[in-house]
Amino acid sequence: MNTPIDTFLQSVKGLCTAITETELAFLESGLTVVELAPKHFYIHAETIQRDVGFVHSGLVRCFYLDQKGNEITVNFVPEGQYATHYPAFISQTPSRYHFQCIEPTTLVCLSYDHIHRCYEKYPVFERYGRLVTEEVLKVQQQRIESFLFSSAEDRYLDFMLSNPSLFNRVSLSYLASYIGIERQSLARIRKKVSQRRK
């Protein structure tokens, strides 16, 4: 069975197929593993994120508090993805979001300082950083456009299609918040979709 670090390094090799074992070993030298319990925070809003976390196992929810103190879910981070407010991370400014574990979660952490040591020593890591940035920006853009151009029902259906493994791992309250509707509205949409499929 692969260790969390093995899994992370395999993901790096998947993005940068030309990376060498020497380069991977240098990357590995700065990695740490963190295990967090459900409801534990990986990142608090208004703090500077010192490392980026690759989720090896578990599930993390990203949310912010609105002016009334309600938690507004903006993302779910499952296995194989990065728990990070990336723009704030790369600029080392305070994050606007909380990242809280929904399940027992193991993360492989790569510090800001070590990333820059990797950039300076091996140019291949600049490609890796660019590819991760592109993926994060793509997800953010899709999220923005879903609210501009899609209905709540469309967002629900898209979530079901895009995240089949998450559907039974996320509470209805969190999912309703993510879609941007009240829980009662989500219940109506679920009933409507279920009846249509019969």
Image (cartoon, rainbow, N blue to C red):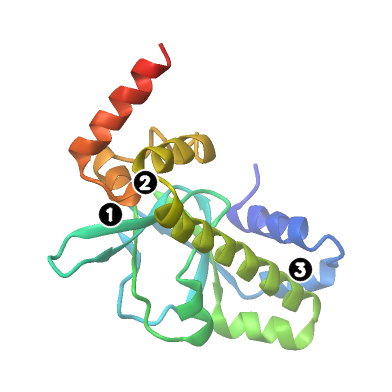
Which is nearer the eye, 99 or 172? 172
Tag 3 residue: 24
Amino acid beneath label 2: Glu
Residue 171 against residue 145 in the figure, above or below? above
Of badges 3 and 1, nearer the viewer stands 1
Say which quarter of the image contains residue 137: bottom right
Dot 3 alpha-carbon crowd within 10 angstroms: few under 14, some 14 to 19, many 20 or more: some
Dot 2 alpha-carbon crowd within 10 angstroms: few under 14, some 14 to 19, many 20 or more: some
Residue drawn at 49 percent across, 35 percent down: 165
List x then y, in percent, for residue 51. Answer: 50, 75
Quadrant including the N terminus: top right
List x then y, in percent, for residue 53. Answer: 51, 65
Say which quarter of the image contains residue 113: bottom right
Which is nearer the eye, 57 or 180? 180
Quadrant including the C terminus: top left
Q: Secondary structure at mark 3?
A: helix
Say which quarter of the image contains residue 127: bottom right
**Who comes first in sequence, dot 2 or dot 3?**
3
Numbered label tally: 3
Q: Is residue 23 visible?
A: yes
Q: Is residue 76 visible?
A: no
Residue drawn at 37 percent across, 83 percent down: 94
Tag 1 residue: 39
